[in-house]
Amino acid sequence: MRPFAPIALLITAFLAGGAGAIGFEEAVAPDPGDRPLQIGIWYPTRDETRTVLPLIVFSHGTAGGYEDLRPTAVALAEAGFIAVGVTHTGNNFKDNSYVAQGRHLIERPRHIARVLDYMLTSWGAHDRIDSQRIGMFGFSAGAFTALVIIGGEADFSRAAALCREHPEDGDCDYWKGRERAGDGPKQMPTWIHDARVKAAVIAAPAAGYTFAPNGLSNVRVPVQLWAGTRDHIVNTTTSTAVVRELLPSPPEYHEVEGATHFSFLGPCPPELQAIMAERARSGQANPCLDPPGFDRAAFHDRFKRDVVAFFSRTLKDGKSGAVNQ
């Protein structure tokens, strides 16, 4: 839940760009509860005889944008899915003000529901979407968002127990700051769930401890869960391990040796690597830097393949038949 706005802005700028064999468009989804939502949509352009396709909605991490997870969205579009990413209001690289207000996690699930409403009713090619085959991909705070969407009930009062038992956890700085401001976690929000989502990929989930002791008991969809052994942002003990234990059905679990938090974003182009290396000399985090011996490009080849395979398998029983492999 720590902000990385300048880094996210650069990552977004370098990851944005064209891809072959798929189409892309930007759009705006109405959100009556707040400002309109900026979204990006990737879709197949081949095999026009296929009239309906599965849909995957993406949720980025704190201070990110819909482009952050572009490599995985592109891979899904190339495999015959429609992929839509949303830039979360007040928790993105241009405006991260909802973090200071304590609103960023609470608002996110509504954003996902409004994006699905738009895609299924107002998007120009909405008749190409199979409404029975919808999945979600969430990274970091976006993974928290996905867990709520599929039935999770988070309890922010669990932060007190976290900080007593694990005072070294990075999230404790955030929660203590909220308490000093006089608006720490006091009440349970009314969480928004969405039964239209039938499967979820959860990568490096933030704030997993908030779902203890039984906040994931209502999750009934298949989950693919990812963790990096060198994640320096999300504490795998207090977050990912908690999620894995609490899910009613065991998830398809992948623990990636040597992966950091940012390893789940795409490989950094050489230009971005140089910029981040220069910034790191002044003490800033370097999201392009992986531990010695870790090949992010090779990992992403496997990661994208496994994500596509998971959604192809778990969303295969819709009205429109199998997805291209």
Image (tube, rainbow, N blue to C red):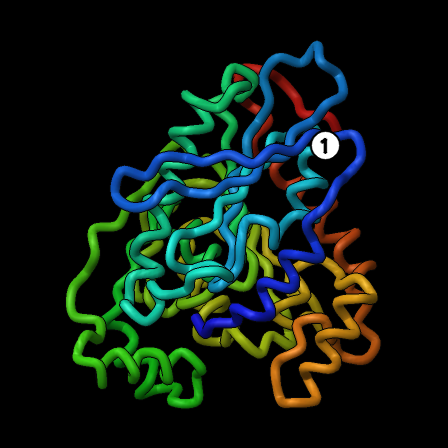
**Residue at (56%, 70%) from the top-left corner?**
6
Q: In the rendered image of this protein, does residue 10 appear above or below residue 69? A: below
Whole-percent x, y for residue 40 in the image = 56, 39
Q: Quadrant of residue 159?
A: bottom left
Whole-percent x, y for residue 240 in the image = 49, 66
In the picture, which quadrant includes the C terminus?
top right
Residue 38 in the figure: left or right of residue 163: right
Whole-percent x, y for residue 182 in the image = 17, 79
The answer, for residue 85, to whether it is visible in the render is yes
Give the tally of numbered discs. 1
What residue is pinned by disc 1?
79
Front in this rendered view, residue 111 or 186: 111
Residue 324 in the figure: left or right of residue 165: right
Front in this rendered view, residue 114 or 79: 114
Given the image, on which type of amino acid does mark 1 rest? Ala
Whole-percent x, y for residue 253 in the image = 59, 57
**Residue at (55%, 31%) from the top-left corner?**
55
**Residue at (38%, 29%) from the top-left corner?**
117
Residue 144 in the figure: left or right of residue 159: right
As helix, strand or loop, the secondary structure at mark 1 comes to loop
**Residue at (62%, 12%) from the top-left corner?**
51
- Answer few, some or many: residues within 10 Å of disc 1's Cα (few below 14, many 20 plus, some between 14 and 19): some
Q: Quadrant of residue 172?
A: bottom left
Front in this rendered view, residue 272 or 223: 272
In the picture, which quadrant includes the N terminus?
bottom left
Q: Quadrant of residue 2?
A: bottom left
The answer, for residue 244, to whether it is visible in the render is no
Residue 61 in the figure: left or right of residue 149: right
